Image (cartoon, rainbow, N blue to C red):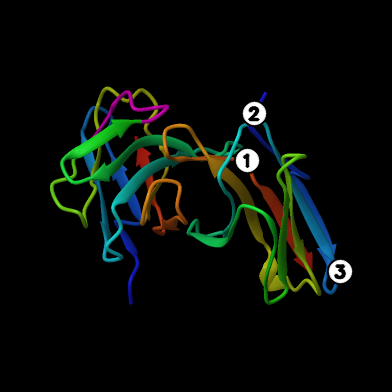
Amino acid sequence: DGGITQSPKYLFRKEGQNVTLSCEQNLNHDAMYWYRQDPGQGLRLIYYSQIVNDFQKGDIAEGYSVSREKKESFPLTVTSAQKNPTAFYLCASSRILRGEAFFGQGTRLTVV
Amino acid sequence: KNEVEQSPQNLTAQEGEFITINCSYSVGISALHWLQQHPGGGIVSLFMLSSGKKKHGRLIATINIQEKHSSLHITASHPRDSAVYICAVGGSQGNLIFGKGTKLSVKP
């Protein structure tokens, strides 16, 4: 079955450590996105990518980095520069920009 | 002012009731999305529409482009419909701009 796989579902890290969240899709979608969700707020865009080896900053990119070396994969690194990294992170993809979006199950990151 | 506003924020209904969730937006769009998020966090796309009305089972979504307003209706609601329903529109960067969601609880 086609879909988006995020791993792990829960992640704990010590403050000051970088951590990488995985996102893989087998839908053959060109566009991929990373969103952050905080309680009481809508999802906010961190980064997105329209094509391999290209990505764009979203509204809250500071403290995060991404790569898109393969069409299927769009990993997100939460760096130690991110001041408040504890959140729920969602990866999504769509066939084209603004197209119907498919979401992963999310990764809940807790930094202690 | 948020670009996408949903109402109500919270909604409690009895099983069998007809439910309406509203979404207003202030930006020009090509399409509007309705999404469902279950307590575990995963999000499922329910509808993507740019005009008129779409129906899928007990769910109906309508959009009025002139008024910049969309509604999601659930007929014969059931406890398994309990979830957060999210409205989203296409942003200028090619991403989606999300509303804060409507938390629906359907009691048996």
Are the residues under badges 2 and 3 in a single subunit? yes
Chain letter of disc 3 in the image: B
Question: Which residue corresponds to mark 1?
Answer: B100
Mark 3 is surrounded, within 10 Å at the Cα level, by few (under 14), some (14 to 19) or many (20 or more) other residues, namely some
In the image: residue A68, left or right of residue B98: left
Whichever of callouts 1 and 3 sits on the residue coming sooner in the sequence is: 3
Q: Is residue A84 above or below residue A7?
A: above
- The image quadrant of residue B56 is bottom right
Which residue type does callout 1 highlight?
A: Lys
Chain letter of disc 2 in the image: B
- Magenta stretch encompasses residue B89: no
Q: Secondary structure at mark 2?
A: loop
Residue A42 coordinates in the image, percent (x, y): 56, 39
Which residue type does callout 3 highlight?
A: Glu
| Mark 1–mark 2 CB contact (< 8 Å) | yes
For the residues labelled 2 and 3, the Cα–Cα distance comes to: 30 Å
For the residues labelled 1 and 3, the Cα–Cα distance comes to: 23 Å
Are the residues under badges 1 and 2 in a single subunit? yes
- Residue at x 48% of width, y 59% of height: B42
- The image quadrant of residue A62 is top left
What is the magenta range?
A58-65
Question: Which residue corresponds to mark 2?
Answer: B2
Q: Secondary structure at mark 3?
A: loop
Residue A43 coordinates in the image, percent (x, y): 51, 40
